[in-house]
Image (cartoon, grey):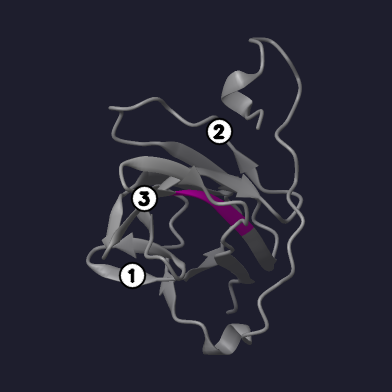
Amino acid sequence: MENASQVAPGSTKFPPIRNKVVPSTPLAEIPVIQLPADGLPVTLDVSYNGDKVLFGLDGDTAPALAWKAGGYALIINFVFLEDEVAPEKWRIEEMVAVTPGVWFSAVSPSPTPINQTLCIPPIPGTYHIGAEVTRLVNDDRVLETDIKDPVIVVTPIVG
């Protein structure tokens, strides 16, 4: 797969938008982490536990984020964590756009503390992003072919 980090410097090529079927679970039933609406970038841990992608902030984890737009774009710095689920180990390789309008940086090489940055415009809606995950089986890494799909819900500030 060609990703943004493999594109020549100065190129205007963007990573492809990924098409995926939206999960059938209603958004109201998905646990969320409410992000601050102060316009400042936020750093989140992101991991895959063998079942779903989880975002982590201040000890809380959830498969979705909610954020009230206040005129600023949402900037998230992702720190990819390896998650061990016996007998397998999982690692996120890259976050990718599923919904148009979501922008990602290239994946930073290790050992940088931040692996990738996301930007979502302050436009209310439900934004789907994907995570390409690698599974470690008997010390061999196997790239999962499907894209795991967490969501970010951007709601307008009322009042």
Q: Earlier in the sequence, mark 1 or mark 2?
A: 1
Judged by its main secondary structure, the magenta piece is: strand
Whether residue 32 is visible here, answered yes or no, is yes
Q: Amino acid at mark 3?
A: Val
Mark 3 and mark 2: Cα distance apart in space: 29 Å
Q: Nearer the viewer, residue 142 or 112?
A: 142
Element class at badge 3: strand
Q: Position of residue 82 (x, y in %)?
A: 30, 50
Residue 2 rendering spot, x and y as whole percentages: 66, 28
Q: Is residue 48 left or right of residue 69?
A: left
Q: Nearer the viewer, mark 3 or mark 1?
A: 3
Q: Mark 3, residues whose alpha carbon is within 10 Å: few (<14), some, or many (≥20)?
A: few
Q: Is residue 147 above or below residue 141?
A: below
Kind of residue sitting beneath label 1: Thr
Q: Are marks 1 and 2 in contact (CB under 8 Å)?
A: no
Task: Answer whether labels 3 and 2 touch (C-beta < 8 Å).
Answer: no
The residue singled out by tag 2 in the image is: 105
Residue at disc 2, secondary structure: loop
Residue segment shown in magenta: 129-134
Residues under numbered marks 3 and 1 in contact, where contact means CB atoms less than 8 Å apart? no
Residue at the spot 38% in from the left edge and 40% down from the top edge: 140
Disc 1 is placed on an element classified as strand
Q: Which residue is mark 3?
A: 137
Q: Is 11 in front, or is 34?
A: 11
In which quadrant is the N terminus drawn? top right
> What is the crowding at mark 1: few (fewer than 14 residues within 10 Å), some, or many (at least 20)?
some
Residue picked out by circle 1: 61
Q: What residue do we see at 70% from left, 54% from top?
A: 98
- In space, the residues marked 1 and 2 are separated at their CA atoms by 23 Å
Badge 2 amino acid: Ser
